[in-house]
Amino acid sequence: MARYTGAVCRQCRREGQKLFLKGERCYSDKCALARRDFAPGQHGQARKKSSEYGVQLRAKQKAKRYYGVLESQFAKYFEMATKKSGMAGENLLKILESRLDNVVYTAGYGMSRRQARQLVLHRHFTVNGHTVNIPSFLVKPGDVIEVKGSACEKIKENVEKNASRPVPMWMSFDKDALKVVVNRLPERSEIELDVEEQLIVELYSK
């Protein structure tokens, strides 16, 4: 399976803002963007004028990097979104939010989506009683996500660190039982990520 293996801090620097891809490090003085507030590469500090296409492309790249999705899969999600009723941009964000690795991160099991993806790959979670090790698995309303067997120390540690993180209304999280119930798919107002979905729609509509 294809995946990005480069330095994730370069992605934040390229977008010019924190994407919170490395968990706790993003909140510390070690954050690469805090130390080098310019794009990576030889010409990173040069001033560049963005075209309309460039602005739309950056919106798509930012969304891909937030969720850790590569191009082919992102395009597939957009195609799925256009076939659903409602606005394609909002449908796209709902699909991305319903990925299992994102649900695991949002519930507080992981410090970042990247770590949540790793925890899923290592078979630490079940969905409706069945082990699922596919980060892109799309959950549905009514699905129950639980930690498989006895929780590993890393998951317990993450849950304690994220105790103050608010859990969105579209899911319920039982901290003691380490169980998440998906009540419904999120509304656009509940997705706090800085994603301009209309620009993504315009890009794919060209």
Image: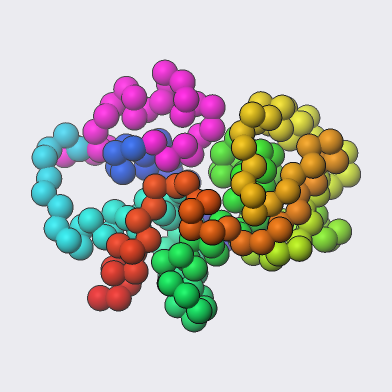
* x 32%, y 22%: residue: 35
Depth order, front residue of 83/36: 83
Depth order, front residue of 164/106: 164
Location of residue 53 (image quadrant) = bottom left
Residue 101 relative to residue 66: left or right: right
| Whether residue 117 is situated above or below residue 162 in the rendered picture | below
x and y, in percent, of residue 125 in the image: 77, 50
* x 84%, y 47%: residue: 148
Location of residue 178 (image quadrant) = top right
Extent of the magenta region? 18-43
Residue 84 visible, this orientation: yes
Is 158 magenta? The answer is no
Residue 33 relative to residue 137: left or right: left
- The colour style of the image is rainbow
Which residue sits furthest right?
149
x and y, in percent, of residue 137 in the image: 65, 63
| Whether residue 107 is situated above or below residue 82 in the rendered picture | above
Of the 4 image quadrants, the one containing the N terminus is bottom right
* x 79%, y 56%: residue: 144
Secondary structure mostly seen in the magenta stretch: loop
Residue 135 relative to residue 93: left or right: right
Of the 4 image quadrants, the one containing the C terminus is bottom left
Residue 30 relative to residue 133: left or right: left
x and y, in percent, of residue 61 in the image: 35, 55
